[in-house]
Amino acid sequence: MPSESQPLTSLELGAAATVSQINLRPEQRGRLLEMGLLVGTPVQLVRFAPLGDPVEIKVRGYHLTLRRQDAEQILVQISS
Amino acid sequence: METQPPPASQPANIETVSQLEKSVGRTLSDSRRPAAYVVLTGNPNSGKTTVFNALTGLRARVGNYAGVTVERKEGRFQGGPGDPPIRVLDLPGTYSLSPQSLDEQIARDVLFGRLPEVPSPAVVVIVVDASNLERNLYFTSQVVELGYPTIIALNMVDVAEVNGLSIDVAELSAALGVPVVPLVASTGRGIKDLQKQIVKLVSENSPRGVPPPFCDLPAVFKTEVRLLTPLLGSTSTARNASPQAEALLILCDEKFLAGSDGHYSAQVTQAVKVGRQRLEAAGVDWRSAAIESRYARINAIHQAVTTEAEGQREPFSDKLDRLVTHKFWGMLIFVGIMALMFFTIFTFAQLPMNLLQGFFRIAGDFMGRLIPPGDLQELVVKGIVQGVGAVVVFLPQICLLFLFIGLLEDTGYMARAAFLMDRLMSKVGLHGKSFIPMLSSFACAIPGIMATRTIETRKDRLVTILVAPLMSCSARLPVYTLLIAACIPGRLITQSLTMLSMYLLGIVVALGMAWIFKKTLLRGDTPMLVMELPPYKRPLLKIVLRHMWDRSRLFLRRAGTVILGINILLWFMASYPRHAVVEQQFAGARLALQRSFAPGHLTHEQQKNALEEIDTARAGERLRGSFAGQAGRILQPLIAPLGFDWKIGIGLVSSFAAREVFVSTMSIVYNVAEGADEDTHTKDLAQVLRQQKRPDGTPVYTTLTAVTLMVFYVLALQCVSTVAVVRRETNSWKWPLFQWVYMGALAWVFAFITYQGGRLLRFH
């Protein structure tokens, strides 16, 4: 059973999960999807920048950074 | 353009050629075959530039696409038969054919054959990073669908192997329907195979036909693509790109209707609008459906062709990142790298700068001896040689900055710097990538402004360009030094603090202005940051040096054209008109003095000094009577509220050539002869400045005037080189003029507040 959805940013550092929902406006979402971050894609929260923002994630084997406020709109489920 | 039109379109030429063939008896027509274009494309950080260099050697030509500042890199293919000639075009790195930046838009337009200046590609080579295969396959699949004869250059297979990934090349080739060549471009492994494959496809010269669709779209989507395709076949100007692929792309391109560039007919835009409505009605999200289908297929291919070794080690790059982006060590390393950059620029650039200065002095002397004294001599020595010298002297700093920027980019650290600094920059509405351009501007705004090319959003890039020259560049340093020496009393500590405050003022105003511009003139959502952190790479010196030289050359070319022209104009303003009475007076005085030299009465040295004294006085008189002098007087009412007199006005006007020219102009204005070296000269000049009195007997250069003048220098855009570079980078006069006006207004207002506020507080 997959657990409940939570914001990507609330994961523990290094924890892996699966994207369950992307609550960004459609016109903002485009590039994120093209970079391979889709519903159902496994992601890993790598770290926050030293000043707390942005956030670094690992997706499809490479590293990507997003601002915290955007990453908070990406919901994930921790796979059991 | 080097391509020639196909012979068929020029029957007259064919006649001449065939006549020649008859008379000479050999085939000329072959050598007239138009060049075949091999287009290199791929994601950023896929090693495309390295592949390009391996294919072309280091003789690439770097220019711009017409009307935009996107770098156009083109070179001759090495290792082909030479007939037809093959040219390689390196497109900017691209994540998708739905462009987000100007770079990506150009790449898309070339691949669609939309740019009249670029012939339709004969072969497309997609450079793919094997260690990041999945994401790279997204763009790859889009390009493969266009239907050109295509080769996949599977680069960095060595990195993939180290990471424990092995890729079944044959299987990948079968899945994509195009040849795949494994490569390690940095060591040259596999380049021969790639060359052979390119030559083969170029000589076959046969269209691939319409490739099958890469992914399985929802049925309604397929119908829409089928409906739109015939419209494109008839109305589109795409020369070889498959209309199916184009139909699919414009159906799901968010920006297609919003930013319609007039490329498509009203019929097509209407059809797209209606098609999207039908898709929405059917419950299909036209924005994401194609992306999802593509990734579904990519997932399947990726799993089929790659095998991951068990028990992988953490890649070196990830380990390094733990240190480099660490809360404490990461920041320390960042500050260290930046400090090293500036230390290097200010110390190592000094020697070549002195050499250049010496060179221009010698060149001036030489020309002075070659040309008899008179107007022509003055024009050449003072106008051309000294004018260009004043700007070219900064070349070593500019080269070093470009070298550093190139190294930061090529190693992958640049993205980390943006990652570390994004928080700070986003406070004023900018992107982390704006940090390095702004920082570089402390040495010189020119490389800083040119480094803004990496910023994707046009508005963010413009804001960065607009505020970058507020950072105190090294040309302001001599001005600060002189004024502080002349007017800031007391000890080293007060003087250092004054200097520091000037730098801080620039930073604070730059950030404030950036914030204001983002709120008003260039309003726009802070764009979403979606930035890749590429794995660290060992930089290739050849590429970094090449890059440095390409960019520095642009600056030199400017110095040789626009900047030279304006410097001659400034020289003219400072030398003319000549007043016959004054000239005669000095000529008379000189003659009288020369006659009075009785043999043995004065040493040669003393005679020379006496003559120089007259010449210095004459130069001062000339300048004061010149157009620049008049400009200073005209400016007087404007600058009087700032506490500046017309002589300072002359300095302000002439500083436009380069800010440090203020120092030499002031020494001419006040008849200060050139000292033995720079230090004594500054001291002499500072001494003279302190003695200047206003008509009412109070000194001109009080502490308050000096501080006001420095504030003015911090904020005003007195630099023709910067204006020329901004003109080039924004491709219009609008922005450099706006920048000049706003910075001038800012300088005046701040100087006014400083001066009048200081007087109110009875601070002198």
Image: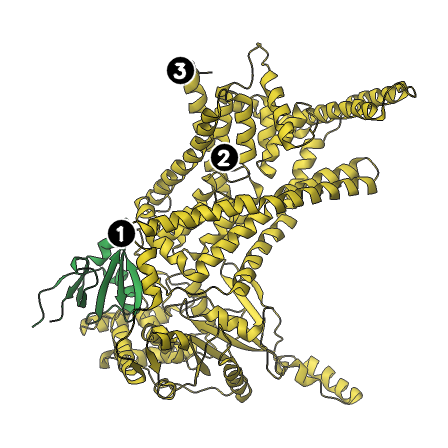
Residues at marks 2 and 3, common chain? yes
Chain letter belonging to callout 2: B
Binning the other alpha carbons within 10 Å of mark 1 as few (below 14), some (14 to 19) or many (20 upward) gives: many
Question: In this view of the protein, which residue sits in the foreground, B319 or B262?
Answer: B319
Please state if B324 lies on the left or on the right of B646 as rendered: left
Q: CA distance from mark 1 to mark 3?
A: 44 Å
Please state which of residues B327 and B671 is positioned toward the viewer in this rendering.
B327
What colour has chain A? green
Q: Secondary structure at mark 2?
A: loop
Residue A53's mark? 1
Q: Nearer the viewer, mark 1 or mark 3?
A: 1
Q: Amino acid at mark 3?
A: Leu
Q: Name the mark nearer the viewer: 1 or 2.
A: 1
Place of residue B724 in the rendered image (x, y in percent of width and height, measured from the top left): 56, 47
If you read the primary sequence from the N terminus, does the residue marked by circle 2 or circle 3 appear first? Answer: 2
Residue B758 visible in this rendered orientation of the protein? yes
Label 1 SS: loop
Horizontal and vertical percent position of residue B582: 77, 22
**What's the chain of the residue with tag 1?**
A
Q: Colour of chain B?
A: yellow
Q: Which mark is residue B761?
A: 3
